[in-house]
Image (cartoon, rainbow, N blue to C red):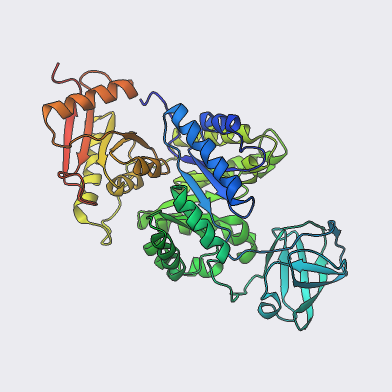
Amino acid sequence: MIKQKRNKTKIVATLGPTSCEEEIIEQLVLAGATMFRLNTSHNTAEEHAKTIDRIRAIEKKLKIFIPILVDLQGPKIRVGNLIKPIPLEVGMELVLEYGLEQTDPEIVPVDYKGIADDVHEGECILLDDGKIKIQVTKKEGKRVHVKVLHGELLKPRKGINVPGSTGSVSAITERDVEFIKFAVEHEADYIALSFVRDKDDILLAKKYISHFGADIPVISKIEKPEAVENIEEILDATDAVMVARGDLGIELSPEKVPMVQKQIIESAFNHRKTCIVATQMLESMIEEPIPTRAEASDVANAILDGADAVMLSGETAMGKYPVEAVKMMAKIARDVESSPFCCYNIDLEMNEDYEPTPQAIASAAVKMADYLGAKAILAFTHTGYTTRLLSKLRPQVPVIAVSDMEKTCRKLNLYWDIHPTLKNWDVDLTDNLLKKIDKLLLEKTTFQKDDRVIIIGSIPKLITGRTNFVRVHRMCAFQ
């Protein structure tokens, strides 16, 4: 057993007003959070930079690896800043017009210049995650006249969705480009791309990342119907996916989301890509100290479906109980992972998009660990390539990933049941290396003499995706 035992399923926590201070960040990590998300829809680059500094300070203090996700806003259309919230009642008539600030009480500002071009008479528009529904009655130049169908208090900066509309705006905005540069400069570990439609959006994002001199993995957020239709090409191009159920549920309608979620997770498995399930997982814990039974079931079923990670948004960013929310999610994950319903040692077919040798060795390592009763799999990795393949096979024993790259160790901490450690060792399988492995395992685990460990890696070690050996090691055999 790993001494610093954590869940197999990783937990992503969004930081915000109630959780961005160093003390709370540390409590979130100790509660079970393994990655932190910075939502660039809110706060300035300077504020996010301070949060990153706090995360890195906690990382150093606790001697662990904490990946940071910079989540781009994308072409999200929002209500501008209002003079005061507007109580909307059924039958009321409003005017929408491009603007960032409300200067006329009769006009609702919208932060998208093309709003009048992208909507049509008779079309319905949803605001504030679908709580408000309005219908376009006519257009006059750049103004859109609407009638309220479902009312609610309209607050500033709430999201606007036009279901069925493809829109004319680019998937990557000028603001996104600035935050891509920010992510590179501050050495973020992942960048999340919002409102992805197809592989071209991902390739464009990677082009910008490369332009700024980095190779940061991209997580594609699936929240538009076009993305669901193009999920296979998206998975070919992306590094990971996020089932972003908020906007997805608005664009598709809520009843379709559960089956789409299962489809995306299954496709991610087939493509050997990491999958995060997000949005409203423990939503009631924004206000309450315990979740509803339905929310607990939602988290459990996402894990049973095969999610590599589950994410908290408002629960940790602005909720009253951020630490309790993480603790609860960790408890649910542990219960699921120890249940007979959780699948382990999955036998996946060979994927022609990956080198056959690393796939074969990863599969062999999982089977050998099972047959021999090994306590763990120890994987030497430079980039994390084979370790990701190994993670998707869901070995029943933990995977200890030994890398010579700090950025790889951070990246690995999003992968299911991967425990990274930083060591710049020569991988030569000499007696000296095996003694180092014994010492590491004795420090980090409760393993004992004669326990078996399966070792995989590459000789030479610096060639990506060239894992070429597997070895059965009996601990302390040299004593």
Residue drawn at 44 percent across, 46 percent down: 308
Nearest the eye: 1 or 40 = 40
Residue 346 located left or right of residue 268: left
Q: Which of the 4 quarters of the picture holds residue 148? A: bottom right
Compared to residue 323, the image places residue 101 above or below, namely below
Can residue 433 be seen from the camera position used here?
A: yes
Compared to residue 120, the image places residue 255 above or below, namely above
Residue drawn at 29 percent across, 49 percent down: 385
x then y, percent, for residue 246: 62, 56
Nearest the eye: 356 or 239 = 239
Residue 370 located left or right of residue 265: left
Residue 111 located left or right of residue 325: right
Residue drawn at 21 percent across, 34 percent down: 425
x then y, percent, for residue 172: 53, 66
Count the marks: 0
Nearest the eye: 112 or 310 = 112
Q: Quadrant where the C terminus lies?
A: top left
